[in-house]
Amino acid sequence: MKKIKISVRILVELIMKKGSIDNRFVGNIKAIEGIRGHQRVQKSYGDEYTSEVSIKHTFSFDEIEIEVEGRMDGLLIENNKTIIDEIKTTTKDLLLIDENTNPLHWAQVKCYGYMYCIHNGLDNIDLQVTYYNIENKSTRILRQKFKICELEEFFFALINEYKSWASMEKKWMEIRNESIKNLKFPFEEYRQGQREFAVRVYKSIVDSKKCFAMAPTGTGKTVSTLFPAIKAMGEEKTSKIFYLTAKTITREVVNDTIRLMKKQKLNLRSITITAKEKICKMSEINCNPDYCLYAEGYFDKINNALKEILNKYDDFSRKNIDEISEVYKLCPFELCLDLTMFSDIVICDYNYIFDPRVYLKRYFDVKKTDFTFLVDEAHNLLDRSRNMYSAEINQDTFIKMKKIIGKKDKRILNLIKEIESYFLEKSKVLDVMKEKYLVENELPKALLELFNTLMKFMDEYLSRSNEENSDLLDLYFEVNKFISISNFYDNNYKTIYSDELLGINIKLFCANPSDLIVEKINRSKSATIFSATLTPLNYYKEIYGSEDGDFIINLKSPFDVKNRLLMIGDNISTTYDKRKDTAEDIV
């Protein structure tokens, strides 16, 4: 019997989501604000409230075992009865929200309600959706009582719609797994250390461990990680492989390696996620049905298109995505994300897992998955994560904003003047100190209060404004990111004030993102973290959360040291006082 796992979120969105893609400004809530809003609601309760409760339910039909899993935002015990809480963040007026505002919100909590009743032998249960306004910190709770028969009817109506998808997935898994059984290593022989590397990757997946590997250039890192991961997938030890890399050229190597294995009649669906900016077909990224024909009716068209696509393609390359999106008039970026649900291997940049603003929430809104991460060039992940969790803003941002706003909104204009005064004070401090930099261990709380008020005014201004001003939106999101990153600020952060060409710059710098990286890595079943320059290895093991039982491998170069040519340029001085004169020669 084949086992298929699906999250409540994906189930509900796959079956129920309708209409067009519309990202026009209506009070933009980013992922980080949503997370912090959830946490504020959860912390407002006492011991009677349990946050982030995982739940799953397994049932069978037609030789398919389906496991539906999810994570309830909260379980509340009130007067000896249990209430399931689903939290949603918004900038809308809470008085305008009722039970019919968004059926998907109630759909999720009704699925949780059914599973909870089944597991706990309940005949009925109270369900609530808590709406939290991130601007004024107010909440509105909508609560309804449901009988188990009502929830069962709703749940299995969704499942009946999903059965055709599950049957299609079962058929594909059987074809895929049978082809993987016959898959052999795609080269005549292993290079030195390559077989040992592949074995440890395989064992790390089977044992749900991490594997740390330093493998010099030429050891065949790509195939040494992909091959054992695919073999483990064929034995259903993992359901999806994420190959993470910072370089476009490496993604091409991964695709070439998969194509090489497909010469053995391997059946495997792979997809490469291309950034929206690169794959968008329009002259501007303006995701709404009035501007973009690929956004219009996207969710009405996508399911029928997906079924046709999955029967025709198994290589979702950028070229194929581009062709498919044109045939079906679908947004290529959203299509790419939707196709990841049916892909065995997802090849993508680090940010789709680690960046708090753009990570694939559809997969990682649960604490644990059975996915495998293959993290290539892992020495780059640390600096990339520092950038993901850092934010900076320059006073020039507000000079530009002031010019665009002009006299259209006096509240915003006056607030910008207060913000400029803050920057001016910091400039004076640096002048008195006769320093270019000032480093502090605390958040600029006064500035953040001004920013939060500015965002409230900007929300209102942009919501009522008919003008399309991409420059103003860019400035808005710059401030928004600064506020968002401030939510992560702890002892691992520094605040850096610097005097730059365009004025005072303020940076929230994440000096040590280790805890944030490890939290994301630990959502996988297994992660292989490898690079040619993962040295010192013990340092990276600590940074990336090595635990007892993890696999470690340090490969030697497969090339004969006798063939090495060592050249020393002793005609260039690298002393500090000569660097300006010799830097160009070194480059």
Image (spheres, grey):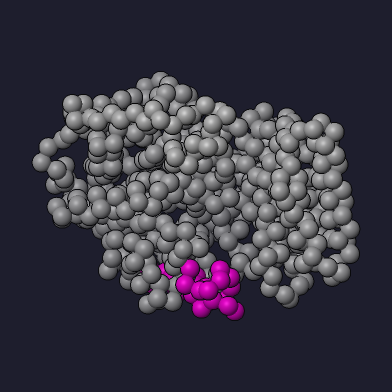
Q: Quadrant where the C terminus lies?
A: top left
- Extreme residue in the front direction: 571
Q: Do we see residue 67 in this rendering?
A: no
Residue 169's spot in the image, x, y percent? 31, 57
Magenta span: chief secondary structure: loop
Choose between 394 and 185: the one closer to the eye.
394
Residue at horizontal 65%, vertical 45%? 391
Q: Is residue 322 left or right of residue 35?
A: left
Query: Quadrant of the rendered structure where residue 244 is?
Result: top left
Q: Is residue 483 left or right of residue 179?
A: right
The question of residue 193 being in magenta is answered with no
**Where 188 falls versus 126 (above or below)?**
above
**Where 231 falls versus 435 (above or below)?**
below
Query: Quadrant of the rendered structure where residue 263 is?
Result: bottom left
Residue at horizontal 28%, vertical 61%? 314
Q: Do we see residue 379 in this rendering?
A: yes
Choose between 83 and 480: the one closer to the eye.
480
- Extreme residue in the left direction: 188
First to last magenta residue range: 280-306
Residue 415's spot in the image, x, y percent? 86, 55
Choose between 394 and 361: the one closer to the eye.
394
